[in-house]
Image (cartoon, rainbow, N blue to C red):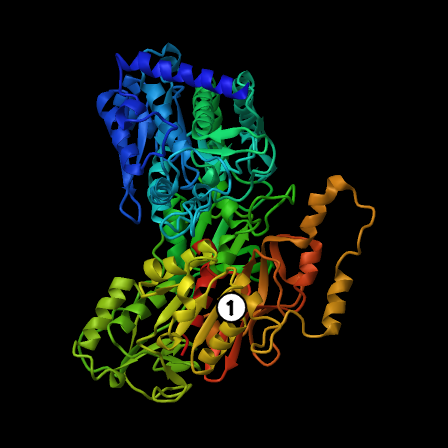
């Protein structure tokens, strides 16, 4: 019966194409040469179709907004009435006036913007097919109802947010599918090889990157998104092929800054969808699984920017192909999948158009409220800048991309506020060089979400991490105050760098390490063949203070360098916006002289490799790859795990092992081989789940426990077995053992090279429950004493007890080499800036 209903609906849909295209635009089937749902459409054909309909209709315009890492175009299709399309720029500017992001009084024109984002996960590929169907339906001139919708609605269709991932999946599927439909779930066309099509080029999940903007697709899209700020945004996804369709309203927890209106309108949209799904007997669910808490999603980020942000989830994903047999014995086809997304697309536009005046009024109120003084929270965030603005530079770039306003004072003043790093209220002085970020501004809600010291959870069952606060992630000394501080200077200048002389005799040059840009500069120096040293003790040279871990380029080390070293240093200082100090003598006022053995020479030909391929966790491998190529600009050798046993490890200086499942290669022989390589001078950098293969054995010092006393202490802190627990409470009882993105303040040994550039603490983001004991005989660079070190986020009671006296970062010296243990992922989604610095220290230390 289900198949008959779907086919009937499809017949009506196809007939509407044939009817309208006689006087209107070409249908997808006519343009592509096959009917939608009978094949996956490569991105270049999707682009071609969108260009064709935009060129054919005065009610559409295709706007490019950049390219992917692999060079594929990114674009959105604007569709509305002919009058609205001819006035797009005026509508855009008026909409930003409604949000207070452009000066002037807005016209309350009753127009709303509905932004539909399809295919952010490349192998959730049905939604791009639905995007083409939706565009065709909206542009057919014979549909009076849709023409009425578009009188007050501007529809923005991003048909493919992730073209690189989509094409990786589409071409893989095309190469592996059978000539006839094989719906068996274990057929080869239903099981992708590594890494799959979900991620972008660098194997990042773009649906977690809306806030952090680490990827070029996200940065390009956000530049355009913030030029428009839609009232409604939908992110189209797919889930398990046995799941019913999911649409709004979302599950709890909602972030506490989400308004009642936003919550209520989600329910309104859900009711409209339900009407159409009921008519076709399509299964669906709401209010489960997909919450509105973590700000990096395609539903939450728009919500924190005044929109009704929603996720829609269709069954299928990368397993489904053109058709797969479900647990009911039915076959879920690509036609089923795109039809469901097509239906919710039109339903979203319909309910938005019908309620346009209400959407507009609440959108305006949202941004008016954002500019008011907060009565029960912080009104100003202050980022201290006493040591220069190197670490702040990344923050400024992020604030600019999100259009968050900031400035600074013209004179010092006193303030009382909450100190993030000390975790208490303090009295402090704000200096003119400090960064002032006022809460009273249009982007107030997003700002407060990103800077909240402690996340407030109404429900602990969440879909993602539960803490992310920028001051902890970026390692920035920050104050939050309830006071309203009127800053005097628009923008931020920070502290100016001291210019370098381009001529004259110099003993050498030096710069401090505080942030990733310092390592990018180091990378360029090493690639130019320059010798660089680091100091293991602080140095005073003239009036210049150079703390441990600073980088020294000494003239006597670089007599082979044929260029004018002073001129090169001056050019690099300007290019990297990093202050490089000129040193006039090798004699230090305090600390070791520059010829001391305490200034260690770095390996200028450092060969760094990373395991890559089958059984490696692709996200973590991608984070390493992206860091080296896009931030450090340093060569990284990606080593395929399938040939690991044939790799000549002697050609490597550093081997990075990301999270993964390595039982087949890190067996007894593999561990013995690595142990020997380390003893001969290699450096092994292990991350997350990779540590489990090195723990509790004879070859390495890593242990899960130190002694029985430690086990007993943990047992005291954990719950006893509950023999009378109720079955309905099972999921909530299980979360007692989980840590979902909890931030902990770890004690840090900043005298060790891995800890250079840090204070005596480090904020780590724990996303796993794995626990290892502090090293007995090794270097415990960072460690957690116990549950009292938690700063923010959710950690179950048992999981908190489990981290008693636990390792965060450890170094084991073995022969002439080292093993560096990162229990937590220091590169998490490329936004944990403090972790990046620790990681680079581990890779490049002498």
- Indicate the quadrant containing the C terminus: top left, top right, bottom left or bottom right: bottom left
Q: Is residue 632 above or below residue 559?
A: above
Q: Is residue 142 above or below residue 605?
A: above
69 left or right of 244 in image: left
- Percent coordinates x, y for residue 734 in the rendering: 69, 49
- Indicate the quadrant containing the N terminus: top left, top right, bottom left or bottom right: top right
Q: Element under label 1?
A: loop
Quarter occupied by residue 831:
bottom left
- The one nearer the camera, 640 or 357, is 640
Looking at the image, which residue is at 82% across and 49% down?
A: 723
Looking at the image, which residue is at 78% across and 42% down?
A: 726
Q: Is residue 410 visible?
A: no
**Outermost right residue:** 724
- Percent coordinates x, y for residue 686 in the rendering: 49, 67
**Outermost front residue:** 180
Graded by Cα atoms within 10 Å as few (under 14), some (14 to 19) or many (20 or more), the crowding at tag 1 reads: some
Quarter occupied by residue 693:
bottom right
Residue carrying label 1: 666
502 left or right of 30 in image: left
- The one nearer the camera, 183 or 337, is 183
Q: Is residue 532 above or below residue 64?
A: below
Q: Is residue 549 above or below residue 689?
A: below
């Amino acid at each position: 019966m289900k198949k008959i209903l779907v086919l009937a609906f499809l017949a009506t849909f196809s007939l509407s194409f044939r009817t309208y295209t006689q006087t209107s635009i070409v249908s997808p089937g006519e343009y592509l040469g096959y009917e939608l749902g009978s094949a996956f459409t490569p991105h270049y054909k999707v682009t071609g179709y969108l260009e064709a309909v935009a060129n054919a209709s005065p009610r559409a315009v295709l706007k490019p907004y950049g390219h992917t890492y692999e060079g594929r175009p990114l674009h959105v299709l604007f569709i509305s009435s002919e009058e609205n399309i001819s006035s797009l720029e005026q509508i855009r500017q008026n909409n930003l006036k409604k949000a207070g992001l452009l000066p002037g009084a807005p016209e309350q024109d009753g127009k709303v913007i509905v932004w539909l984002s399809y295919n952010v996960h490349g192998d959730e590929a049905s939604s791009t097919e639905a995007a083409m169907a939706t565009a065709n339906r909206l542009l057919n001139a014979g549909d009076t109802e849709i023409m009425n919708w578009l009188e007050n609605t501007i529809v923005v269709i991003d048909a493919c947010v992730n073209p690189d991932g989509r094409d990786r999946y589409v071409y893989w599927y095309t190469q592996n599918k059978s000539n006839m439909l094989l719906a068996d779930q274990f057929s080869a066309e239903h099981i992708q090889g590594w890494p799959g099509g979900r991620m972008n080029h660098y194997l990042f999940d773009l649906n977690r990157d809306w806030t952090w903007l680490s990827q070029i697709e996200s940065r390009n899209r956000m530049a355009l998104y913030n030029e428009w700020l839609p009232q409604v945004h939908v992110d189209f996804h797919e889930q398990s092929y046995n799941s019913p369709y999911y649409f709004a309203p979302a599950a709890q927890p909602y972030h506490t800054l989400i308004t009642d209106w936003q919550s209520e309108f989600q329910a309104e949209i859900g009711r409209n969808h339900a009407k159409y799904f009921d008519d076709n007997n399509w299964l669906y669910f709401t209010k489960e699984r997909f919450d509105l808490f973590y700000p990096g999603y395609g539903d939450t980020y728009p919500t924190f920017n005044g929109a009704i942000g929603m996720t829609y989830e269709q069954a299928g994903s990368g397993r489904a192909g053109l058709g797969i047999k479900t647990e009911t014995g039915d076959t879920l086809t690509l036609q089923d999948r795109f039809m469901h997304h097509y239906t919710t697309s039109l339903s979203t536009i319909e309910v938005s158009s019908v309620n346009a005046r209400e959407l507009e009024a609440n959108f305006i109120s949202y941004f008016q409220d954002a500019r008011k003084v907060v009565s029960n929270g912080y009104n100003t965030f202050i980022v201290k800048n006493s040591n220069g603005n190197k670490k702040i530079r990344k923050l400024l770039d992020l604030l600019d991309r999100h259009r968050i306003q900031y400035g600074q004072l013209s004179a010092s003043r006193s303030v009382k506020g909450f100190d993030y790093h000390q975790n208490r209220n303090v009295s402090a002085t704000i200096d003119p060089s400090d960064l002032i970020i006022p809460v009273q501004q249009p982007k107030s809600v997003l700002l407060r979400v990103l800077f909240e010291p402690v996340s407030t959870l109404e429900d602990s069952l969440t879909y993602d991490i539960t803490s992310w606060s920028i001051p902890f992630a970026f390692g920035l000394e920050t104050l939050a105050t309830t006071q309203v501080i009127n800053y005097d200077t628009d923008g931020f200048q920070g502290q100016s760098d001291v210019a370098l002389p381009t001529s004259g005799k110099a003993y050498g040059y030096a710069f401090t390490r505080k942030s990733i840009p310092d390592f990018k500069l180091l990378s360029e120096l090493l690639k130019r063949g320059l010798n660089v040293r680091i100091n293991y003790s602080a140095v005073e040279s003239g009036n210049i203070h150079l703390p441990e871990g600073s980088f020294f380029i000494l003239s006597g080390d670089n007599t082979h360098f044929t260029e004018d070293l002073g001129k090169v240093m001056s050019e690099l200082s300007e290019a990297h916006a990093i202050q490089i100090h000129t040193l006039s003598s090798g004699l230090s006022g305090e600390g070791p002289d520059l010829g001391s053995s305490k200034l260690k020479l770095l390996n200028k030909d450092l060969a760094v490799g990373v395991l890559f391929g089958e059984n490696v966790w692709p996200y973590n491998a991608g984070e390493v790859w992206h860091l080296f190529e896009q931030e450090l600009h340093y060569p990284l050798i990606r080593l395929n795990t399938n040939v690991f046993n044939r790799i000549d490890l002697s050609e490597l200086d550093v081997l990075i092992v990301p999270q993964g499942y390595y039982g087949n290669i890190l067996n007894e022989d593999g561990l013995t081989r690595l142990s020997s390589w380390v003893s001969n001078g290699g450096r092994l950098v292990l991350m997350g789940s990779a540590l489990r293969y090195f723990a509790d054995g004879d070859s390495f010092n890593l242990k899960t426990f130190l002694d029985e006393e430690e086990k007993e202490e943990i047992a005291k802190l954990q719950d006893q077995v509950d023999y009378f627990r109720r079955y309905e409470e099972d999921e909530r009882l299980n979360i007692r053992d989980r840590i979902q993105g909890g931030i902990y303040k770890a004690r840090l040994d900043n005298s060790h090279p891995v800890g250079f550039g840090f204070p005596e603490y480090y904020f780590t983001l724990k996303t796993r429950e794995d626990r290892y004991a502090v090293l007995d005989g090794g270097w415990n660079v960072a460690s957690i004493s116990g549950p009292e070190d938690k700063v923010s986020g959710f950690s179950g009671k048992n999981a908190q007890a489990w981290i008693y006296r636990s390792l965060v970062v450890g170094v084991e010296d073995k022969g002439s080499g080292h093993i560096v243990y990162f229990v937590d992922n220091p590169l998490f989604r490329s936004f944990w800036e403090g972790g990046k610095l620790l990681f680079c220290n581990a890779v490049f230390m002498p």
